[in-house]
Amino acid sequence: MHVWSQLMSLGFAITGMVLAAWPRETDDAFSEAPRSCHWPAAQLPRWPVFWTGLAFLGYLVVQGLNPAWQFMIDADSWWLEPLDPITWLPSSVEAPFARSNSWRTLTVFSTLLLLVSSIWVGFTRRKSYYALGSLLATNAGLLALVGLAQRLDGTKQIFWSYVPSNASFIASFIYPNHAGPYFYLMAALAVGLAWWHNQRARKRLDHPGAAAAYIFVAACCCSLVVLSSSRMSILLLLAFILAVAGRLGWRMFKRTGPVRQRPEWLHLSLILAVLLGLGGMTLRTEKVHQRFAAFVADPATASRERTLTRQATGDMFRDHWFFGWGAGCFRYGFPKYTKKYPAIHYWSHGPRSTWEHAHNDLLEFPVELGVAGLLPLSGILGYSAWQLCRRRFWNNVVPLSLVLGCALVVVHAWVDFVFQNPAVLLTWSVLLAAALRWTVLDQPSRRRKSIDEGK
């Protein structure tokens, strides 16, 4: 979440886009003539998400060029001074890039558009997306093992070298509530790949050991979710396991033949065993037990802080509902609205005087972007959902698992600022795009064509 890491990420995204757009000989699905040289970037104008994403970036540029307030600071305090913006255009707060402003948000979303576009035009076969998923899952498994080692060692430094601002860090995540969504997303990816390998093993196209390896990765990621002590992350992880178990159970009962000959019994039993094991592990973790116990004992008090923040954020949205306050500018306008709710300054873990985020992305994005800025994002999500449903993603185990994981992150965004972490935002977007492409490239007609061409 630091400036240097976001600029490096943008540099990698630009490099990836250049490599993906470089002309090459290919016989992929985009080319009518086998082994013909073409420019992959020429396919971008045919992709609605690309143009909608450019429109959204243009909106952020207009916000940044048309500030309505200027951030001022001295040794004791900070304040906003009004400027003279063009009223019929989106506006923002003129503030330091290192702190947060529309240009900082533009950096993150430019990285996002370049990354997803490079994957869309650069990866044209299912095995490319499988390689991408394998790399992401392996990286997450290794990171989870490092996180477990750090927790067992009791170190106060990330990677035993960097002292973070939060002593409750998990692996490389400074904020545990960001680690939770990342690792249950990776657990969903690992489960999807394990499920896919298991299906191939049943057809004698693959070795069952690959499925076991991904189950191990999923178990490591699940352990990090529990150790994050994030209540919502743990609950959503359990919801994911229940959903997968339910899907396996449905497939089992739809099949004909004697029950003993249905291999899904074993898979369902393993899923339920993991569920029970995670539940017991959660209750035995002292910090997690204390957090859940406090919520169960007095749910009204435990949720009061987020409720007051949500109410103040709603007031902030109603004042600038059409164009918003400016991307990355929530923290500058929000103090004006906390005066109506004095109790908001006293959280359960101590006094709180500043808010960088609303702890609710589904409200913070409307506050910053307004209804006009949400239209491109809504169009992208609506198009993706339509394409997934059109291709019946629920009939393919990898897209099904990825979509479930992505949907859970959206639910999580109602109670926390998970999408404000670029690692979560970029990973979520890449997995959603991969789920959509997998449904296209895994169609029976395409598989038969690949076999006929000797791929």
Image: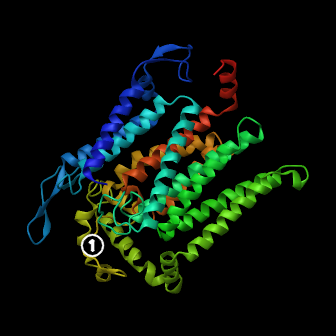
Residue at 55% across / 64% down in the picture? 236
Which element is circle 1 on?
Answer: helix
Q: Position of residue 338 (x, y in %)?
A: 27, 75
Q: Which colouring convention does the figure follow?
A: rainbow
Q: Position of residue 139 (x, y in %)?
A: 48, 47
- Which residue is under mark 1? 337
The answer to whether 163 is drawn above or below residue 280 in the figure is: above
| Relative side of 393 to 203, left or right | left
Q: Which of 235 and 369 is in front in this view?
A: 235
Residue count near mark 1 (Cα–Cα under 10 Å), binned few <14, some 14–19, many ≥20: some
Residue at 47% across / 83% down in the picture? 300
**In the figure, residue 393 lies in which quadrant?**
top right
| The N terminus - image quarter | bottom left
Single out the residue that lies furthest toward the right: 258
Q: Which of 386 and 420 is in front in this view?
A: 420
Single out the residue that lies furthest toward the front: 153
Residue at 60% across / 44% down in the picture? 399
